[in-house]
Amino acid sequence: MHSDSPAWALYSCVSFVVAVVMMGIGITMNPGASWIHAYFAMSALLLTGSSFTLAKMLRDRNEAQRLHQRIEEAKTEHLLKTYELKPPLAA
C-alpha cells in the first residue's frame, strides 16, 4: 500500500491552512457591505467542504475499482488453474 512521506503530509496540511487564512484575510479586507463578506465566507466554506467531498468520492471510486480488478484477477487465476490443459499421454 502506498504511504505518503511525512514531508508531503506536512506540506499538504500547511498549504491548506495558508490557503484558508489567505481566503479569510481576503474576505475581511474586501471593501463592501457585511452581506458581501458573509456571501464570500459562505461560498468559501461550501467550496472547501465540496472539495473534501469530491476528493473522498474520487478516492473511494479508485479503491473500489482496484478491489474489483483484484477480484476479477483472482477469478481468472482460479479458472485457469481449474481448467488447466493436461499434456497428452505419451504414445
Image: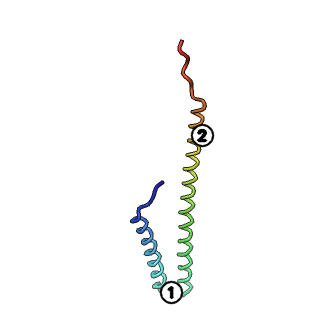
Residue displayed at 55% across by 17% down: 89
Q: Quadrant of the C terminus?
A: top right
Comparing 16 with 22, the one in front is: 16
The residue at the far top in this view is 91
- The residue shown at (54%, 21%) is 87
Q: How packed is label 1: few (under 14 Cα within 10 Å), some, or many (20 or more)?
A: few
Which of the two residues, 71 or 52, is positioned nearer the viewer here?
A: 71
Secondary structure category for the residue under label 1: loop
**What residue would you read off at disc 1?**
32
80 above or below 13?
A: above
Q: Return the mark for residue 87.
A: none
> Residue at point 45% right, 74% down?
19
Q: Residue furthest front?
A: 90
Q: CA distance from mark 1 to mark 2?
A: 63 Å
What type is the residue that disc 2 sits on? Answer: Lys
Residue 33 % position (x, y): 53, 87
In front of the other: 1 or 45: 1
Residue nearest the observer in this picture, 4 or 53: 4
Task: Residue under label 2, please give it.
Answer: 75
Q: Position of residue 7 (x, y in %)?
A: 39, 65
The residue that appears at 57% across and 33% down in the rendered structure is 81
Q: Residue 68's spot in the image, x, y percent?
A: 58, 48
CB atoms of marks 1 and 2 within 8 Å: no
Farthest residue to the bottom: give it. 33
**Residue type pointed to by label 1:** Gly
Q: Measured along the vertical axis of the image, is residue 82 above or below residue 53?
A: above
Tag nearer the camera, 1 or 2: 2
